[in-house]
Amino acid sequence: MNDATLANTGAVVIIGAGLAGWTLAREIRARDPARSVSIICGDAGDFYSKPMLSNALAQGKSAAQLIQTPASAQATKLDVHLRSHVWVEAIDAANHVVQTTGGEVPFGQLVLALGADPVRLPIPGVGHALSVNSWDDYAAFRAKLDAFTNARVAIIGGGLIGSEFANDLALAGHAVSVIDPGQWPVSQLIDAQQGLGLATALGQLGVAFHWGDVVASIEQASDAGAHRVRLASGQEIEADLVLSAVGLRPRTALAELAGLHVQRGVVVNGFGQTSHPDVWALGDCAAYASASAKAAEPRPLPFVLPIMGAAKAIAASLTGTPTAISFGPMKVRVKTPAFPVSVDAV
Ligand SMILES: Cc1cc2nc3c(=O)[nH]c(=O)nc-3n(C[C@H](O)[C@H](O)[C@H](O)COP(=O)(O)OP(=O)(O)OC[C@H]3O[C@@H](n4cnc5c(N)ncnc54)[C@H](O)[C@@H]3O)c2cc1C
């Protein structure tokens, strides 16, 4: 970045009211009480901690209790103009305007904080499976789960999110099965020794694992509401609820449509700028070129700590002090109290 006149480039419009959007708004406000900051989001915009979705049961919290600050109060606190339940449909970067379901919104600087979509497996009956990647998803999941005292829950994917939900659900007395093609939980991030320790601890809570297997189909079982999950091995699992936790795909469609550089995510340079100097990105939608010391190409960092670092740096740049994002070593604690482990976020 070489534009030293950034401080005078006008209104900041942020698309997305997740941790990335709200954290950036807070950081800008801390540096500049007068700057016009707007957030446009397709959801309600309530401020909540997404990591708590996978340990809410252990903490005795309902979905409603996970909302830390309602959207309107958060907007007032940060003096942000919030347009909630409004979807951005297109970005015209050259003319500094976005098209939304509520009309056109001009911007001086635009920030994409769009998050990611849960990956859905291309298998028959996948529509029966729920994914949890937002407060709305979690509320829908809990509405179904809370109808049971001992639900049978099949979790597709034994990665970080699948393992956290397995631990939380088992602690709450539900009967959990996990299906994963690997040989131990969180196998892409932890070694066999830790993984087998985690598997043993979760097994002691009653979690049943199906390693080296994949789901072939999901169908409605004959009894009301239950599902039959068929595995490639031929095994069948009866489940009241099926939870899909097989990864996330950064939301890049808007950026692609706008002609921005996209590669595994919306590619940003060391300052958080996309290929258009007045459009920035952070959070789960971004692919950070500067985090690639260990990797060959820009990569997503779908964790909280990178959001904090990126938000601080982008806020500084947007308020007149060009600042590179710095990612130090970042440990993410996997929320599996049965066997706590940490993984490297960067
Ligand atoms: C269950 C779970 C547990 C986790 N636990 C941890 C943990 O322990 N530690 C950790 O570091 N990380 C954890 N993570 C990851 C972390 O929570 C995420 O990296 C972070 O919350 C992502 O925030 P975000 O703002 O980028 O995206 P999101 O929270 O997904 O926000 C995206 C926003 O963009 C809006 N949006 C998208 N498209 C449009 C559009 N076209 N128009 C308008 N608005 C739009 C959405 O409505 C939403 O407001 C966890 C994730 C999950 C799912």
Image (cartoon, helix red, strand yellow):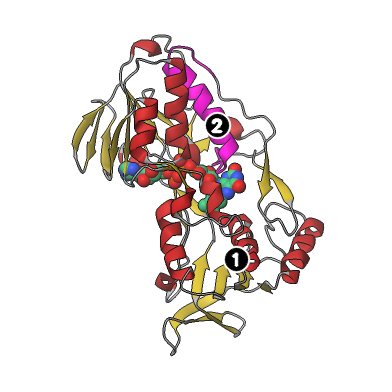
Residue 109 in the image: above or below residue 188: above
Q: Amino acid at mark 1?
A: Leu
Q: How many residues crowd around disc 1 within 10 Å: few (fewer than 14), some, or many (20 or more)?
A: many
The residue sitting at 42% across, 21% down in the picture is: 29
Callout 1: SS: helix
As drawn, the residue found furthest toward the right would be 193
User: Is residue 58 visible to the viewer in this orientation of the structure?
Assistant: yes
Q: Which residue is mark 1?
A: 169
**Label 2, label 1: how many angstroms apart (C-alpha)?**
29 Å
| Magenta span | 297-323
- Of residues 104 and 27, which is closer to you in this image? 27
- Residue in the foreground of this view, choosing between 2 and 296: 2
Residue holding disc 2: 308
Outermost residue toward the bottom in this view: 222
Q: Is residue 295 above or below residue 280?
A: below
Which residue is the extreme one toward the left?
103
Confirm or deny contact between disc 2 and disc 1 (CB under 8 A). Answer: no
| Image location of residue 212, percent across then percent down | 67, 72
Residue 259 seen in the current view:
no
- What residue sits 67% from the left and 36% below the top? 330
